[in-house]
Image (cartoon, helix red, strand yellow):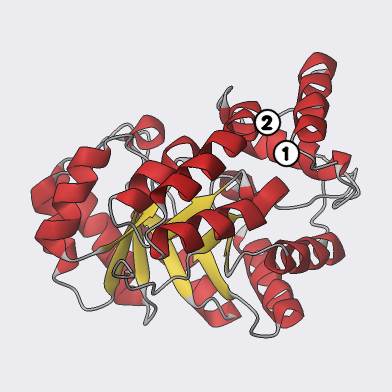
Amino acid sequence: MSAVPSRSFGSVGVAMVTPFTPEGELDIPAAQALALSLVQDGADMILLSGTTGEAPTTHLPEKQDLIREVKDALAGRAMVMAGAGSNDTAHAVRNGVGSQEAGAEGLLINAPYYNRPSQEGVYRHIMAVVEATDLPVMVYDIPGRTGVRIEDGTLARMAEHERVLAVKDATGDVEQGFERMEATGLEYYSGDDGLNFAWLAHGASGVVSVAAHADAHSWREMIAEVDAGDLAGARAVAQRMRPLVRALMGGGQGAVMAKEALLLQGRIPCAELRLPLVRAEAGEVAALRATLEECGLL
């Protein structure tokens, strides 16, 4: 039996989409029903208002409504986390504080995007949100979207804080992550569905997944097999999941394709997005439907 890593934020997290009505308004009943279905399928952590939740185009009162109502619907069956991302530190702090006030049980904080601050700026930005709240924090390292990496020394400084507990890693660099796990003692969560098996085999605590919208139970199965030391079994799950991951994430439009998948599965009533995101084209939806059918998910 292999040693099981600590899991402050669960093991199967879903970066949940934010359902909207056809008019583009927040659809709270759909969000509640979706969160419940994800937990029933194997998720034990729901992340609201992340990138996949279209956080850049929802406003704080909407984010707070979403947290309150989803948490109420889940009634303790899974942890509810919230994204506190912005390229304006004061705005990120407001998001973090507002999320805590609404009942979030943890925060995901990314480096500021677009304005590409120095490492000192990255550190001060993230720690300003940490210090403004009382919640456990997962730092999100996704340089492909933020335009700035969180470097080793910066992460080591953050790790000194008692409430900075984990990293969601979407750098694509598993070797670097393995070294950082050892150096900092932080829990690691895969932020790249195509690398979930690699991260778990290297000792990660879990995943924060987009593909789990359509199939959370397979990630649950993979983690159980890694925990039991059955890497061949876990590898087989990864192989089985590859077409789904490619269909949802291959074009870099996770929020768009996750909503289309959920609509096809009948788990949300509408796949509406807020600009600048737009619906997938008919050919993309047809290919997604074929993949879901091949995977036995329709």
Name the quadrant containing residue 295: top right
Which residue shows up at 84% across the image and 21% down it?
Answer: 286
Which quadrant of the figure contains the N terminus? Answer: bottom left
Q: Position of residue 26 (x, y in %)?
A: 79, 56
Q: Is residue 41 above or below residue 288?
A: below
Q: Position of residue 28 (x, y in %)?
A: 81, 65
Is 82 in front, or is 263? Answer: 263
Classify 10 Å Cα crowding around label 1: few (below 14), some (14-19), many (20 and above): some
In-image side of 112 versus 279 (left or right): left
Q: Using the rendered image of the protein, determine whether residue 83 is visible from the camera's viewpoint.
A: no
Identify the residue position indicated by label 1 in the image. Answer: 274
Which mark, by number, is residue 277? 2
Q: Position of residue 122 (x, y in %)?
A: 23, 49
In-image side of 161 versus 188 (left or right): left
Q: Using the rendered image of the protein, determine whether residue 123 is visible from the camera's viewpoint.
A: yes
**Mark 1–mark 2 CB contact (< 8 Å):** yes
Which residue shows up at 14% across the image and 49% down it?
Answer: 179
Name the quadrant containing residue 182: bottom left
Name the amino acid type tagged 2: Leu
Secondary structure at badge 1 equals loop
Q: Is residue 195 above or below residue 38?
A: above
Which residue shows up at 66% across the image and 27% down it?
Answer: 247
